[in-house]
Image (cartoon, grey):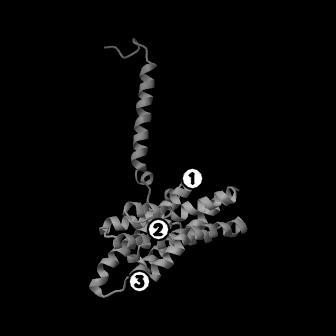
Amino acid sequence: MNETVLTPILDILDVLGIAIFALSGALVAAKERQTFVTMAFFALVTGVGGGTVRDLLIVAPVFWITDPWVAAICLSTALIAWFTPVRMWEGKLLDYADGIGLAAYAVLGSAKAIAYGIPPVPAALMGIITGCVGGVIRDVVAGRPSIIMQPELYVTAAALSAALTVAGMQLAGMFGLMNAWVWGAAFAAGFALRSAAVRFELGLPSYNTAKKGDNDAALSQSVTKSDQSDHSENVSPGSGPPG
């Protein structure tokens, strides 16, 4: 990470995000009964995927290329997944852990973008990308439905952490706040929203649900026209009413 963004709080969030996302990637490979090499690959691409895309977009040195500890953390989590039974990680536990990584990476990504002079709105988007892209890469490579396509709030939780980070850092100087407080509050808010989504299965209305009435009306009109067409084809030329 660039020296301008090196702080104890962001370092902790960085390690949390890397480790949790790497573990989720390794576990996907473990459930598919893959080799350790495949598990390590999944751990790496999931752990660093979002941060890599972010760094390329903000024209920063790719963080895990210059930091030898990142790859070591990913390989260590792959080892943990290799030597532990998959059933140990089943249920909601991993979902909550993933929420920690999501919120941590969203805060980290936004804070780093701000430190590199990125404007507020793109900086918030960098936080969302940092939090979500690793999981998307993991799911695409594994050939399974992406986590962002699930009904539960996921991207929204990352967006909340990212937006609070950017807004808080812009206002911190005006109100004499420390950035560490802003980052902590933004992380807590995003994690709380994701946890609530996991616990209560919260989600936003989908497009099909909102348009159901319109779709039903269109289908009804289509069926009516089809029936009329079939009826007209079955009537012989001279069978109509007298003129």
Against 229, is 104 above or below? below
Could you say which is closer to the camera, residue 74 or residue 120? Answer: 74
Decide: few, some or many residues near mark 3? Use Cα within 10 Å; few <14, some 14-19, many ≥20: some
Where disc 2 sits, the SS reads helix
Q: Which residue in the structure is indicated by mark 3? A: 180
Rounded to the nearest angstrom, the CA distance separating label 3 from label 1 is 36 Å
Q: Residue 19 location in percent, x, y?
A: 57, 71
With 91 as the anchor, is 178 left or right in this view? left
Query: What residue type is disc 3 on?
Result: Ala
The residue sitting at 55% across, 62% down in the picture is 46
Quadrant of the rendered structure where residue 2 is?
A: bottom left
**One can see residue 154 in this view:** no
The Cα atoms of the two marked residues, 1 and 2, are separated by 22 Å
Circle 3/circle 1 CB separation < 8 Å: no
Please name the residue that numbered disc 1 is placed on. Answer: 141
> Disc 3 versus disc 2: distance between alpha carbons?
21 Å
Q: Which mark is residue 63?
A: 2
Of the 4 image quadrants, the one containing the C terminus is top left
Q: Position of residue 52 (x, y in %)?
A: 46, 62
Q: Earlier in the sequence, mark 3 or mark 1?
A: 1
> Which of the two discs, 1 and 2, sits closer to the camera?
2
The reply to whether the C-beta atoms of the residues labelled 3 and 2 are less than 8 Å apart is no
Q: Is residue 233 visible?
A: yes
Report x, y in % for residue 11.
48, 78
Mark 2 is on which residue type? Phe
Picture quarter with the N terminus: bottom left
- Percent x, y of residue 190: 45, 73
The local secondary structure at tag 3 comes to helix
- Element under label 1? helix
